[in-house]
Image: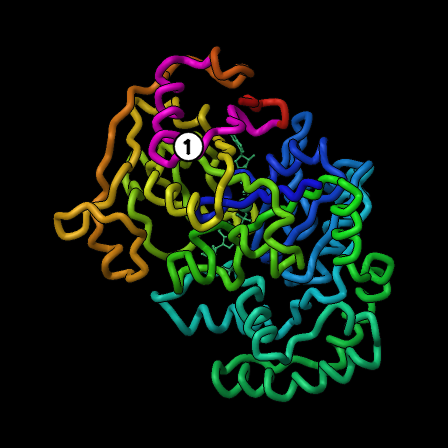
Amino acid sequence: MAGIVVIGTQWGDEGKGKYIDILSSNTDYVVRFSGGNNAGHTIVHDGVKYALHLLPSGILRKNITCIVANGVVIDPAVLLMELDRLESQKVERAALYISDRAHVIMPWHIVLDGLQESKRGKDGLGTTKRGIGPAYSDKTERCGIRMGDLMDAEAFKEKVYANIEIKNAIIEKVYGGEPLDPEKIIADYLGYAERLKPYVRDVNSLIHVALEQGKTVLFEGAQATFLDLDFGTYPYVTSSNPIAGGVCTGAGVGPKMITEVLGVMKAYTSRVGAGPFVTEQINEIGDTIRELGHEYGTTTGRPRRCGWLDAVMLKYAARVNGLTGFCMNHLDTIGKLDSIKLCVNYKLDGKIIDYYPANLKELERVEPVYEEFESWKGVDISKVRSFDDLPEAAKRYVRRIEEITGVKMKYIGVGPEREQTIVM
Ligand code: GDP
Ligand code: IMO
Ligand code: MG
């Protein structure tokens, strides 16, 4: 039995999709357990780029099974669009199953996400406006609609009518928006239901039978530790639990079934949307990292905020997730700078602190303590496949990250392609 969890250790876009794709060559199942189409996971294979939002990143492997589990919120139109796109690209894809317990993103969720963001004005969270927050709110408020409901036309209609009056009242009276037409929603969604029916079922039994049979199940994280609703930089977070613990509730497996927790990280830090970012470089360095790393959002196309690697964040991520290893990306990118800085400590009001502040006012006052590293500018490492063949400066940088965090590097990415990976 192997239950391997792959999660993000920073603010997302660490390159989780690439590692899931790589690791799924030795996997039987890939399970998405949280988030929705706020995620954008890029896989580059033979120069062809695939951007996945809802489909698990194992979908490009034809001999495995992919599962979208209960913890995910699903926009059925997006799911169908992704399936159609793979078909038009003639991809021989993995089998797919979708949990009947997963919540459905409804049009009012998307409308409300946009209206709430506009209302917050300059204090906006910078959400992806995909309806994620409102869908999870309805889940906890217990008025959500699940995939199982969508498969039952009568139950679905009832639930749309049970919701629409209050949703339209909020849209119109609180935010001054346009009300939604329930008949149109029902017609559209029942159309999606027809096409999605073959995929929707109980998936928890599938996962457990697989684990009992000694198969390898990979749990694919979306978002990341610092976007976690409880452990991230609240309120500048997403509305789910993307940390390793989210697998237990988001896919229905016990902690003892998790045998490995891999934390994906970049050799620097990036963030999309608003919120604190201690090592952010709003200067030429940040701009250079953005251009060298092509740091533009996979989902929204927004330029990503960029800065130095923050080992304080990584240490916290190691604890919160119980990391057993790191998968690093973009070692090629960071080596193109003139020199490299690594944040090794936080100083608050002149004193080094040993925790990650929850209080955003404290976090604003934090001063990063940096160590500086020489770079390996001019040496192309994109074809290196063994750690020993890396320039000494690159090895020193990697070893120092391991030393500070107490977590070993398992894989190092030196380019976006599947093959551009060093296995430690
Ligand atoms: P995810 O959301 O965590 O799956 O990450 P994204 O796909 O949103 O962003 C990661 C970006 O980095 C994508 O454009 C990848 O193709 C790219 N990428 C991943 N690993 C590497 C690497 O090692 N080097 C370089 N240069 N690019 C990488
Ligand atoms: P992947 O899986 C980066 C960010 C948004 C915003 C905040 C809340 O590709 O790493 P939401 O729409 O979730 O309510 O937005 O979270 N965010 C991400 N940033 N990568 C992601 O996913 C993200 N998913 C959400 O930019 O700041
Ligand atoms: Mg992404």
Which residue corresponds to the image point at 69% horizontal and 64% vertical from the top-left? 102
Rendered view: 383 above or below 313? above
Q: Residues within 10 Å of mark 1 (few under 14, many from 20)?
A: many
Which residue corresponds to the image point at 37% horizontal and 31% vertical from the top-left? 401
Instruction: Specify start and end residues of the magenta stretch as a single range.
Output: 390-417
Query: Could you say where residue 384 lies in the image, as x and y percent from the top left?
Result: 52, 15
Which residue corresponds to the image point at 62% horizontal and 42% vertical from the top-left? 4
Rendered view: 282 above or below 327? below
Between 164 and 254, the residue placed more toward the observer is 254
Query: Could you say where residue 231 lies in the image, as x and y percent from the top left?
Result: 42, 57
- Dividing the image into four equal quarters, which quarter contains ligand 3? top right
Between 257 and 411, the residue placed more toward the observer is 257
Hey, which quadrant is residue 117 in on the image?
A: bottom left
Render colour scheme: rainbow
For ligand 1, tell me if the residue under mark 1 lies within 8 Å. Answer: no
Which residue corresponds to the image point at 24% horizontal and 30% vertical from the top-left? 371
Q: Which residue has dot 1 on it?
A: 267
Is 395 colored magenta in this rendering?
Answer: yes
Hey, which quadrant is residue 250 in on the image?
A: bottom right
Q: Amino acid at mark 1?
A: Ala
Query: Could you say where residue 223 lies in the image, as x and y percent from the top left?
Result: 52, 51
Query: Could you say where residue 279 lies in the image, as x and y percent from the top left?
Result: 30, 42
Is residue 228 rendered to the left or right of residue 403? right
Between 346 and 333, the residue placed more toward the observer is 346
